[in-house]
Image (tube, helix red, strand yellow):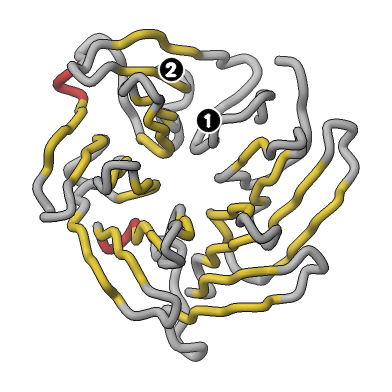
Amino acid sequence: MEWEHAAPGCDDVTVLPDGHLLFTTRTGVLEVTPAKEIVFQYKSSSEIYACQRLPNGHTFVGECTGGRLLEVNPAGKIVHEVRLLPADAPGDHMYMRNARQLANGNYLVTHYGLDLVREYDRQGRVVREIPARGGPHSAVRLANGNTLIACGDRPGGPRVFEVNPDGETVWEFTQADVPDVHLAFLGGLHRLPNGNTVLSNWLGHGQFGKGPHVLEVTPDKKVVWTHADHRTMRGCERADPGRAPGR
């Protein structure tokens, strides 16, 4: 381990082009420099499992229990809000996990407790819905227009699957494909330029110490490498690629 910063309840972390780290802190978002100086902060009363730096310099935030998708400017002011649930009927702990704003301005949201991935437009209207049995935690829109989804440990998971725009599953990776590697809860994922997929394997819910934290698999489902450091960390949920490791 080369670097460390306190991040209680962290579920989403990205290394930005300038080397800063942007990450969630259960009920907030922090951006810190490698010297651990805080340069951006957003605080909320909601559980937060998603944050993303947008091309315009604003920060996207997905509020789980608040049921909101937010765009926050560098000063911490909310400049755009999409309310997915009424203010008097907010979500619960299971409502939302990771979310991303897409290049077209829409939002891709994993509804963990509903076993659904939904794409919303800027006004919060559902434009697409993908069933995701197993508890979807993360979803990414690939360059070819397909959607790659990682599911946790609800019935039907853990698994990762890829669906095309017609809703057809064109690739799937499950425990049956790697009987010698314990999959507990596939939280995060990233498709590499060579077609391989990097997965984070969260070892919560009684699975601490029982499998690798991260693994890379090929399109034909061969394991390239795994990483586990059970002395340093308990679980690894989601991390976007970058130049430096985060915890």
Image point 38% across, 60% down: which residue? Answer: 108
Toward which corner of the image does residue 54 lie, by quadrant? bottom right
Image point 25% across, 60% down: which residue? Answer: 116
Residue 172 position, x and y percent, is 17, 32
Q: Nearer the viewer, residue 190 or 90?
A: 190
Residue 129 position, x and y percent, is 22, 65
| Residue 134 sits above or below residue 243 on the image | below
For residue 39, side relative to residue 115 (left or right): right
Q: Quadrant of the C terminus?
A: top right
Q: Quadrant of the N terminus?
A: top right
Residue 213 position, x and y percent, is 47, 22
Residue linked to disc 2: 212
Which residue type does callout 1 highlight?
A: Gly
Toward which corner of the image does residue 4 lie, by quadrant? top right
Q: Residues within 10 Å of mark 2 (few under 14, many from 20)?
A: many
For residue 68, side relative to residue 187 (left or right): right
Which residue type does callout 2 highlight?
A: Pro
Image point 50% across, 79% down: which residue? Answer: 82
Q: Nearer the viewer, residue 50 or 26?
A: 50
Q: CA distance from mark 1 to mark 2?
A: 9 Å
Instruction: Assign a secondary structure to mark 1.
Output: loop
Q: Which mark identifies residue 45?
A: none
Residue linked to disc 1: 235
For residue 86, side relative to residue 74 (left or right): left
Image point 72% across, 39% down: which residue? Answer: 21
Instruction: Assign a secondary structure to mark 2.
Output: loop
